[in-house]
Amino acid sequence: MKTNKETLPIELLDQIQSRGAGYDLLRYVSLPDLFGNEAEALLYFMGRNLARKFEINALSDIIYFFEKVGWGRLELFKEKNNQLEFHLLSDAVVQRLAMPVDVEFRLEAGFLAEAITILKGKECECIEEVRKKIHQVEFTIIFVE
């Protein structure tokens, strides 16, 4: 793997083919077994690191990324002075929430936090809230500067 700071073009996602089952097994079964309580923190920072690897020049790049990797349809719902609220919904979210294992959205939260940091030039963090009844995940970006 490259160790330099060169970013990858967002179009690289068009060349990746996956159905996702293997990914879900690793993420929701193997990773928690290996890392226990630290798995969610690890996923958050993996998401942040992943965002640094891709050229993110606009909000549309973030939305495109979420769709291409199968995370779902991301929408900017609300924008305030020091925070942004996004909603994530799709059949993929519904299916994940119906799985008979604990699911989380920390990888997505980390990616979104770093991608918005890159776009806005302000450090931020992301908190997610799963709304199972309406099959939606809400991400709140909070600017910390």
Image (cartoon, rainbow, N blue to C red):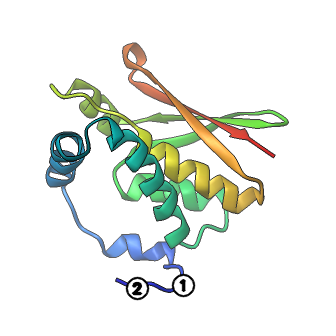
The circle drawn on residue 95 is none
Answer with left or right where residue 98 lies relative to residue 132.
left
Check disc 1 and report the residue beneath it.
6
Q: Which of these two is toward me, 35 or 120?
A: 35
Q: Residue 28 appears at what percent x and percent y?
A: 22, 40
Q: Residue 105 appears at what percent x and percent y?
A: 40, 38
Residue most extreme to the top: 133
Cβ atoms at labels 1 and 2 below 8 Å apart: yes
Q: Residue 137 appears at what percent x and percent y?
A: 46, 29
Q: Quadrant of residue 2?
A: bottom left
Q: Residue 50 appears at what percent x and percent y?
A: 46, 63
Answer with left or right where residue 4 lies relative to residue 16.
right
Q: Which of these two is toward me, 99 or 58?
A: 99
Residue that appears at 50% across and 43% down: 109
Badge 1 element: loop
Query: Residue 137, relative to residue 62: is it above or below?
Result: above
Residue that appears at 34% across and 34% down: 93
Answer with left or right where residue 33 lies relative to residue 9.
left
Query: Residue 38, relative to residue 2: is it above or below?
Result: above
Check disc 2 and report the residue beneath it.
2
